[in-house]
Amino acid sequence: MSATVAAALKKAAVYILGDEKKRGKLFVLIGSIVVGFIGLMCLPVAVLSSMGSMEVEPPEIDKSLFNESAIIAGFDSEQQAKITEIQNGGQAIKDAMTGAGIRSQTIKAQLIYMSYFGRVQNFNVESYVNLFAAAPNDSDLIAAINSTYGLEIDYDEYMRSYTWVMNSTINEYMFSDEGIKNCADLAAWAENAYVSGWGYMNGFIGERNESDRIRYADNAGLMLGYLNYNPTDKVFGCDYDTLVYTEQGGLDTIPETAGIGLFDGSQHGIYVGNGEVIFSSADCGYVTKEVVSNGGWSSWCTYEGVDYPQEVQDKIIEINNVTEENTEESNEETE
C-alpha cells in the first residue's frame, strides 16, 4: 500500500493515535465492535496494520474496556471532540443515504468521508450523497468526488481499502427486510460477497477464516450463508445445512427478478439483474460475476426458505399450466 493511501486512511484516526496506550485501546475497540460508528471509523487503521504499515502489537484484551464510555474516557478533550464530529458526520451520512434510497452504500460513503475528507471545508451531506445516487459505478463515483472536492483519490487504492473493509464485516445496510428471507436480499447478499472479495473454500458459508481473516463460501454456501445469517444478532446460525432447490424452467422462461437461482447441472448462481449472475467458483477460487449468456447456465430455480414476489409465483403457475396442456395434448394424440 502506497504512502498516499496510508496517509489518507490515517486521517480519520490520527486524533486518537497519539501514543501507544491509546493505540492499544483503539485496537481493542476494533476487535470488539462495540462503539458503533467509531468501530467503522477504525477499520481503515486495521487495514494499515494488516498490511504491515503500522507496528502495533495486539493488545491484551481487557473486557472492562468493552464499552464506549471506558474507551472515550481515555482520550483528551480535543480527541473526544474529533470523535464526536466524525460520529455526527457518519450519522448524517447514514440518514441521508437512507433518505435517498441508497442505504446499501452507507459504509462506502462513510469510509470515503472518513479517509479523505479531513481537509474538505463546508461539507454538505446532501450534495455528497447526490454523487452516490447519480454515479453508475465506483469508477465514475471516485472521479465525481475528486472533481467536486478537489481531491486526488486513486481509484485502485480506494478499491483495495474498500474491499478489505467490506470483507471485515457483513454490510448491515443491504437488507430490505431483516425479518423475512427474500430473493431481493439474497441478490444483495450475493452482490455484497462479490464486492467484498469473498474467496471459495469448501464448507464455508461466509464466515471469516481464522488463519487469514478472509471470508469464504463454497458454491452452495453462498446461498446457505444468507439463509443462516441473522442480521439482527450479526451471527451465522445453523438452521440450513443443505441447499434445497426446485428447478422451475429453462432460461427462456426466467422472470426478470433479482435473487432467482440459476443452475447449470452442477453449480448454482444468483441472478442479480441486468443479465448478470454471481456465484462462488471453485475454478477461479472466489466469488465472481459474469454475464449469464457467457456461462453454461441452463435453468432457473427457487430455494427452500426464500420468499419470492408474486411475479415469480405467477411465472411458476404459467410454466406448470403450459406443461399440463402439453401433456394433455400428447395424451390425446396417443389415443
Image (cartoon, rainbow, N blue to C red):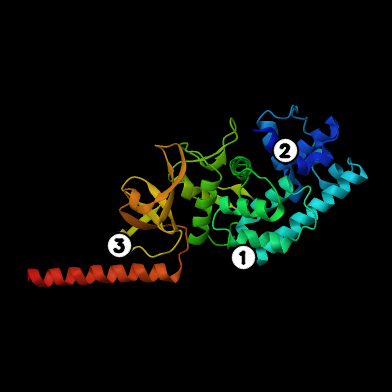
Residues 283 and 34: in front is 283
Q: Residue furthest right?
A: 77
Q: Secondary structure at mark 3?
A: helix
Write down the residue under mark 2: 45
Amino acid type, callout 1: Gly
Q: Which mark is residue 101?
A: 1
Alpha-carbon span between mark 1 and mark 2:
29 Å
314 is higher (above) or lower (below) than 228: below
**Residue 310 position within the rendered picture, expressed as x and y whole percent measured from the top left:** 43, 71
Amino acid type, callout 2: Val
Amino acid type, callout 3: Asp
Crowd around label 3: few <14 · some 14–19 · many ≥20 (10 Å):
few
Name the residue located 53 percent from the left edge and 42 percent from the top edge.
197
Number of labels in the image equals: 3
Alpha-carbon span between mark 1 and mark 3:
32 Å
Residues 306 and 120: in front is 120
Left or right: 22, with 293 as reference point: right
**Residue 281 position within the rendered picture, expressed as x and y whole percent measured from the top left:** 42, 41
**Residue 250 position within the rendered picture, expressed as x and y whole percent measured from the top left:** 29, 59
Q: Which mark is residue 252?
A: 3
Q: Is residue 127 visible?
A: yes
First-in-chain label (1 vs 3): 1
315 is higher (above) or lower (below) than 69: below
Alpha-carbon span between mark 3 and mark 2:
48 Å
First-in-chain label (3 vs 2): 2
Residues 126 and 258: in front is 126
